Image (cartoon, rainbow, N blue to C red):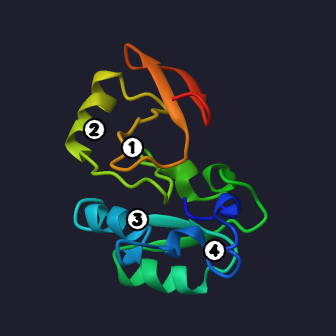
Amino acid sequence: MAAGQGTRLAPLTATRPKAMLPVDGAPLISKTLLQLKNKIKNIVVTVGEHSEDLVIYVLENGGTKVLSTLYKGNCWWLFNSEIREIDEPVLVLPCDNITNLNLPFIYDNYQQLGSPPCMVVPISPKHEIEGDFISSNNGIVTAISRNVK
C-alpha cells in the first residue's frame, strides 16, 4: 500500500508520494521491494497522488502491477480488484514499514493460526518512527494505537 497522502510528512510529500521519499539514499519503498521481488510472484502496489515516478520505480524494481486508488481510501482495492478471485495467501504491507521481513516465519504462523482471512504482523522497527503500535495476546491483536506503544 503506497497510496496514502503522507500528510504527516508534509511538506516533503507536496509533490511526491511518501513511498518515494529517500531513506538511506533510496526510496522508502525500496527495501520492501528488494526483499519481495525474488520470493513473491505477484507484487501489486497501490498508488495515489503524484505517483508517476512511483509507478515507474515499482515496475522497474520487481513490482508486477500498479493499482491507482486515488481518492478511494486505503483499502478500496481489497474489495474492487482481482484480489476477490485469489485463493491463496495475500501479504499486505504498508510502504512505510522499514523492517526485515521473515517470510517463512510469517507463512508458518499463518498456517499455525489456521490460515485466517486476516492476520496482522507486528514489526520491530529498526528506528524510532511514528506509526501504528500493535498489542497482542497469544497471537491475537488486542489493540492498535498511534499513541500507546
At a point 33% along the width and 31% down the height, the residue shown is 110
Quarter of the rendering containing residue 2: bottom right
The correct choice, above or below, for 20 with respect to 80 in the image is below
The residues tagged by marks 4 and 2 sit, at their Cα atoms, a distance apart of: 35 Å
Hey, what amino acid is under mark 2? Tyr
* Label 4 neighbour load within 10 Å: few <14, some 14-19, many 20+: few
Q: CA distance from mark 1 to mark 2?
A: 9 Å
Image position of 13 (left or right of 128): right
Image depth: mark 4 or mark 3 in front: 4
| Residue 138 locus on image (x, y percent) | 37, 13
Tell me, yes or no, whether the two marked residues, 4 and 2, touch with CB atoms within 8 Å: no
Q: Label 1 sits on what residue type?
A: Pro
Which of discs 1 and 4 lies nearer the camera? The answer is 4
Residue position for label 2: 107
Q: What distance separates the C-alpha of mark 4 from that of mark 3? A: 26 Å
Residue 89 is tagged as 1
